[in-house]
Amino acid sequence: MSIIKSYAAKNAGAELEVWEYDAGELLPEDVEVKVDYCGICHSDLSMIDNEWGMSQYPLVAGHEVIGHVVALGSAAQSKGLKIGQRVGIGWTARSCGHCDACIDGNQINCTGGSVPTILNHGGFADKLRADWQWVIPLPDSIDIETAGPMLCGGITVFKPLLMHHVTATSRVGVIGIGGLGHIAIKLLRAMGAEVTAFSSNPSKEQEVRAMGADHVVNSRSQEALKALAGQFDLIINTVNVDLDWQPYFEALASGGNFHTVGAVLTPLPVPAFTLIGGDRSISGSATGNPSELRKLMKFAGRSKVAPITELFPMSKINDAIQHVRDGKARYRVVLKADS
Ligand SMILES: [Zn+2]
Ligand SMILES: [Zn+2]
């Protein structure tokens, strides 16, 4: 018996209630982590509300966990993790380990069926468990109070920078300056790239420049967007609403790439000539692999890239979730364990 105290949704859209569950025997490959902090991500709300039709109740959300190791399964004891070590857990808790994608180090695309942390019972709890591969060692240099959102929001926008080989000479645009977009700007600044923020709210300009944007463009201005034709090596879209995309496609330089991490529900209309004329391409991705998570946390620690967060005690979790639902989070909310 290993009793874990959590905050669970008993059915779709419900307020969270204290719920204790028996996690059973620790699996050989598993690590048990005591939660110190856990971020709240929009995907937590989607899962609580069963927006994607895959939720199981009682549902324990929470997948931006900063904690420390309290138990190691028999096989996990020889994988470099130690009791007491500071670690993080993100969207994924386990992957099969033996499919072609996993063997290739591309565990996020595991064809054996990876398990999201939430469906394994997540971090809105005093403890949780994950396969050792997905338990990410943290450098001492990282600020543990703000680092949680890097494990989901951060890796989501770091992945395209790796995929598209961003360097100090890259010109990169970021659409949407919210939870994801503001981390993208900070990472790009730390990597030395030239950063343009596309924001529909010009009153944010000073704040967005302070995050590290070299340029802030009013995305509601057709003229401002048109003036940027042919400028960008990479444009990352972080919003999930339908926009007039063509000016952004036209803003790509030759060889440029439009990459979406925002789950826009309507198809992106791309004229073939937009891609053909200038070798442009369009891509997307979700979160990242253990190797990329390790790389991100080391980089964030060394370069002092940290999300802008608001802290709530975990016992006030329903207030914190409402704050996110109301769109008031500036820019990510983190829960501090207080049980
Ligand atoms: Zn696999
Ligand atoms: Zn998330």
Image: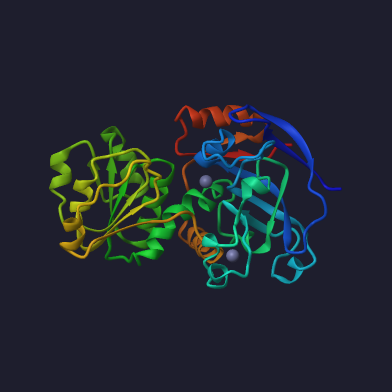
Q: Give the image location of residue 69, x and y in percent.
A: 72, 57
Residue nearest the observer in this picture, 28 or 314: 28
Q: Give the image location of residue 76, x and y in percent.
A: 74, 66
- Type of colouring: rainbow
Q: Report if residue 41 is visible in the image.
A: no
Residue nearest the observer in this picture, 73 or 246: 246
The structure residue drawn at horizontal position 54% and vertical position 52%, both measured from the top left corner, is 151
Residue nearest the observer in this picture, 256 or 116: 116
Count of numbered labels shown in the rendering: 0
Q: Give the image location of residue 284, x and y in percent.
A: 38, 55
Rendering quarter of residue 294? bottom right
Which quarter shows the C terminus? top right
The structure residue drawn at horizontal position 57% and vertical position 72%, both measured from the top left corner, is 103
Residue at the extreme right = 1
Q: Report if residue 71 is visible in the image.
A: yes
Rendering quarter of residue 115? bottom right
Q: Give the image location of residue 20, x and y in percent.
A: 78, 37
